[in-house]
Image (cartoon, coloured by chain):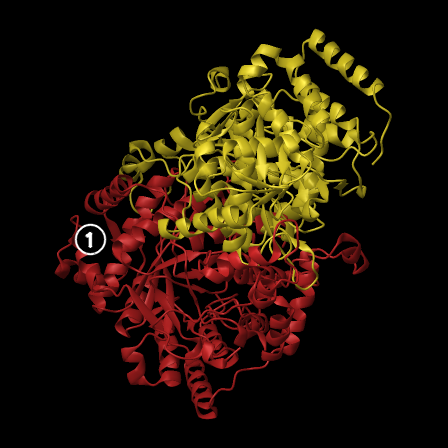
Chain colours: A yellow, B red
Amino acid sequence: MDTAEITGENTGPAPRRERGGRHARRELRMQGPQEAGRPYITRAIPPYDILSEENLIRIEDTADRILAEIGIEFRDDPAALNMWKKAGAKVDGVLVKFEPGLLREILKTAPAEFTQHARNPACSVQIGGKNIVFSPAYGSPFVMDLDKGRRYGTIEDFRNFIKLAQSSPWLHHSGGTICEPVDVPVNKRHLDMVYSHIKYSDRAFMGSVTSEDRAEDSIEMARILFGRDFVDKNCVILGNVNVNSPLVWDGTMTLALRAYARANQAAVIVPFILGGAMGPVTNAGAIAQALAETMAGCALTQLERPGAPVIFGNFLSSMSLRSGSPTFGTPEPAIGSLVVGQLARRLNLPLRCSGNFTTSKLPDAHAMNEGTMSMLAAVQCGANFILHSAGFLDGLLSMSYEKFIMDADFCGALHTYLDGVKIDDNQLALEAFREVGPGHHFFGSAHTLANYETAFWDSDIADNEPYEKWEAAGSTDAATRANLRWKKMLNEYEAPPLDEGIDEALRDFMTRRKEAMEDAWY
Amino acid sequence: MDTAEITGENTGPAPRRERGGRHARRELRMQGPQEAGRPYITRAIPPYDILSEENLIRIEDTADRILAEIGIEFRDDPAALNMWKKAGAKVDGVLVKFEPGLLREILKTAPAEFTQHARNPACSVQIGGKNIVFSPAYGSPFVMDLDKGRRYGTIEDFRNFIKLAQSSPWLHHSGGTICEPVDVPVNKRHLDMVYSHIKYSDRAFMGSVTSEDRAEDSIEMARILFGRDFVDKNCVILGNVNVNSPLVWDGTMTLALRAYARANQAAVIVPFILGGAMGPVTNAGAIAQALAETMAGCALTQLERPGAPVIFGNFLSSMSLRSGSPTFGTPEPAIGSLVVGQLARRLNLPLRCSGNFTTSKLPDAHAMNEGTMSMLAAVQCGANFILHSAGFLDGLLSMSYEKFIMDADFCGALHTYLDGVKIDDNQLALEAFREVGPGHHFFGSAHTLANYETAFWDSDIADNEPYEKWEAAGSTDAATRANLRWKKMLNEYEAPPLDEGIDEALRDFMTRRKEAMEDAWY
């Protein structure tokens, strides 16, 4: 494979990486896995639209009435309230009401598509349009693996997952809080997390949002890496902020999202709706609520800095009405995501969706059944940035080393899936039928020989061998194979080179910031 | 739930069965599971169309050229060759070539939709249009479970799977050769299989196709059950026949498909294409081949008896080009199925697709990752009859008791998925937002109380409990929970009543037929 395939402009469609066959696989191993992938996917198939225009309008009208008649509270951020007042919203205490059309008007300045730059330009990602970026799971306090079971995450786990993501050709982004490094003080860990992303990966990444200061620190580290001017003009860091659903934006979150927007960096605006708890038990209502909450958050970034990149986020889930536990990876959010995708495209905003959701506590059949349905919904709904693409277990409480590997492998399969069915004379293969004729095999045909290297997705986790060979090799299940694989990947990991001066400047900044704070553990 | 929900006409849309909540679940247990389901699904979401009209036409043109320029061999069935000659095809020895348009013209007599009657009228299924019928996996020589591992299937296993299917509210059909009962002579086992479907299930079923005699026997047993006149006028049995891909129809199969058509019963016409072996390695070419082969088989049913019901079958898969093994559940057939769905709808024929495919040897993460992608493709492509909906493992070599349970549970989730997102005032829930307002919970709201019984899919296999509760309950994986469940279901199974006179007549027929044959074991 020519290295030109992974360099060059990132504003156009990603170069197609053909894969498959024994020869292609050998070549892939020689290059190291990351080089073999694409920087992101450009979908060749349309999104899956399930709702009529008429019904989409009914949802939009409901969102408009929620915004106009019930309103959203903006707590602990008086500046945001002033911005809303100036923009023409009705502000009464912390409650803000919006006339229909106001938010859509404000949102017109937001870009439909933008580049998030990586320190390796070949890894920069295009967010929006037909592009899809896979990013690891985000936010688990626990990690688990088959050897040691479940325990709290540490900075070493955090680095391990960055290394695994970096080593996978099927992920495109280094992610953010892949797991909580609970061995580092709460008020300092954002520094170690951002530093680790920069040090151990050359892909794009996310910063902290848990306070305005931490958001600013994250962005400041990006400035050290990319240069102040570059950062002011280009997106180099994302911040994932959550609504305090239903219908409340907390100051912590609006201060963080405004910090990102002020720096021309992209906030990802995400409701957190478990139907029955933070939203109605009916899917259509939860979607209308999500639309209202997300539009408000996205619009606030544009009041802070018109034209700043922003991502419309989707996070729907349901509850077990037997146990009261949240559920993830169920059919309601899967089908709901398809509708959210339609709504986001009508707003002309890039869409974030969640990937491999499950409540399973093990990397088992339950996990991959829910995860696969959830991940397919994410790519089918037209999402551009898919958080939680790999590693998610136990309703986001655990990052699993084995599930990470399985999910990343499935991300690889989705590269093939999203290429769709290509139609040209070679693919239609009429000549091959002439050559082979009725009743004969295609094994050694000229068409097969000419195409087999690029044919068929070839999983690293599936075992397609005959039963007897599989049995002789130890009758392993997928989790066991994934266990072997992540250890091998960590073993073979090589850090991408980082400029020594930048590395030193980042470490200096961390030291100074840490010295200015007392350790806080909660 | 009113019993009226599961009776009534089967020609219209299936009655919607709402499910969920503690109360609804309790009610469900009291009724027995089968009664709680729907006889079939009527989809509320459109199929997922991925290819443009222009590209569909290019595939159709390629199929037409394969048919006209290369042709299809019809071996060991001189009568079929005569029928083709009379219909205007060019017959040269066993090779038949078809002018573009000829098969489409012949296919115009085939119904777009038909009812397959079950002995319990409430279980009759509507095949075609927006309807979806889930049927168990078909054809494995082995069975396996967690207790005893893999072994050859027996008639006891066969009956067990019928009982499990019958007990599941999420399957709609009893299937056919669920597993091969290898303890019964090859030439007699079709009798035991058809009898078992009739005896242990009151749902619709499939008959034998492995010879013309066995097809006739199967249909004769259906006549004993339904009456000769009724069978001549109505579809009561399906026969699944395979092309000997590439481009060969064997006499065994055409004699069987003609026997079904002659009796006004529905043949399911299915290519068997593993790209790289029985078809080209490129997806578009394999799809064009499938279209050519399937159209020819479907058209032959119409020559035999114009107006006979027939189902357009889809079976694409790929190969591991490393090991030469077939692969199942990979992204190429998943995306290819979406295109086959578009092509079948352009022919106005009901579509059969394959469900839960995988090469995994265990009911593990690998199995459900591939199975879920494959099954979602089947429902998204608009398939009307989904064979292999439950139990499939190891590339169809094994029926797994545990995977059967997991798959049937996923079929349940797909009922919810295919209901889509309903839009009405209650679902949009504006009043609930007024009631709850910003920052409060929906738990006890009037809207939640009015809707929670019908909200949210509630899996029997997923464990959504908090980690500590799950751990205290034994830290089970999904396969272990499925293992407990199939034993409980077999234990609680009750046979649906069967008229004593019919039962006796069926047993008499079997005895007579068996006495007329020597045992054959291969």
Q: Nearer the viewer, residue B159 or A73?
A: A73
When asked about the image quadrant of residue A97, the answer is top right
Q: Residue furthest right?
A: A518
Observer-nearest residue: B194 or B198?
B198
Asked if residue A175 shows in the view, the reply is no
Q: Quadrant of residue A119?
A: top right
Q: Which residue is mark 1?
A: B93
Residue A53 locus on image (x, y percent): 36, 49
Q: Please, which residue is most extreme toward the top here? A: A501
- Across and down, in percent, residue A169 comes to 57, 28
> Number of callouts in the render?
1
Relative to B236, A471 lies left or right: right
Helix, strand or loop at disc 1?
Answer: loop
- Residue in the image at 82% along x and 29% along y: A184
Reply above or below: A430 against B456. Answer: above
Seen at 48% across and 37% down, the residue is A103
Whether residue B13 is visible: yes
Q: Position of residue B374 (x, y in %)?
A: 49, 50
What amino acid is at disc 1?
A: Gly
Chain ID, mark 1:
B
Above or below, comparing residue A369 to residue A496 in the picture: below
Q: Position of residue B224 (x, y in %)?
A: 38, 85
Q: Residues within 10 Å of mark 1 (few under 14, many from 20)?
A: few
Give the left or right position of residue A101, taking residue A364 as reference. left
Q: Who is closer to the viewer here, B521 or B121?
A: B121
Residue found 56% across the figure and 55% down from its top? B433
